[in-house]
Image (tube, rainbow, N blue to C red):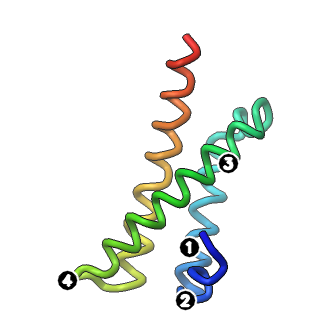
Amino acid sequence: MSSAALRAMSAGAVNAMAAVGAAVIKLHKDTVDKKPELFWNLFAKCEAKAARLAGQAAHTPRSNGDATFIEVYARTLPELVKKALSAREQALH
């Protein structure tokens, strides 16, 4: 995410994103250790997509702003990273 986008978000949303990101990294520690460049590239792409989806959800008429953003981001990022790593693994075999 760009620094301008992060500045526009509340501190709570940014902290939640960091916590979710740290949890996802911890879940995939083996990949981080074995293939760090691959992991960080995939993670950055997944993080950007999760933030984009969460941002869209947070701006819908019935959303709760930051709460919706955090909820969608926390649900989406782990799924995206898992799918990206699985797809990469399947492509290798």
> Which residue sits at x=55%, y=58%?
47
State the image quarter where residue 4 is shown.
bottom right
Q: Disc 4 and disc 2: Cα gap in Å?
A: 20 Å
Where does residue 69 sit, x and y in percent of width and height?
Answer: 41, 75
Decide: few, some or many residues near mark 3? Use Cα within 10 Å; few <14, some 14-19, many ≥20.
few
Q: Nearer the viewer, residue 49 or 82?
A: 49
Is residue 70 shown left or right of residue 2?
left
Q: Callout 1, which amino acid?
A: Ala
Name the residue beneath numbered marker 4.
Answer: 62
Q: Disc 4 and disc 3: Cα gap in Å?
A: 33 Å
**SS state under label 1:** helix
Where does residue 2 sit, x and y in percent of width and height?
Answer: 62, 74
Q: Callout 2, which amino acid?
A: Ala
Q: Earlier in the sequence, mark 1 or mark 2?
A: 2
Report the mark closest to the observer, 1 or 4: 4
30 shown above or below 11: above
Where does residue 83 sit, x and y in percent of width and height?
Answer: 46, 37
Q: Earlier in the sequence, mark 3 or mark 1?
A: 1
Name the residue beneath numbered marker 3.
Answer: 26
Decide: few, some or many residues near mark 4? Use Cα within 10 Å; few <14, some 14-19, many ≥20.
few
2 shown above or below 75: below
Name the residue beneath numbered marker 1.
Answer: 16
Q: Callout 4, which amino acid?
A: Arg
Q: Earlier in the sequence, mark 4 or mark 2?
A: 2
**SS state under label 3:** helix
> Which residue sits at x=61%, y=59%?
21
Query: In the image as oriented, which residue stretches furthest toward the top?
Result: 93
Report the mark closest to the observer, 4 or 3: 4
Name the residue beneath numbered marker 2.
Answer: 8
Decide: few, some or many residues near mark 2? Use Cα within 10 Å; few <14, some 14-19, many ≥20.
few
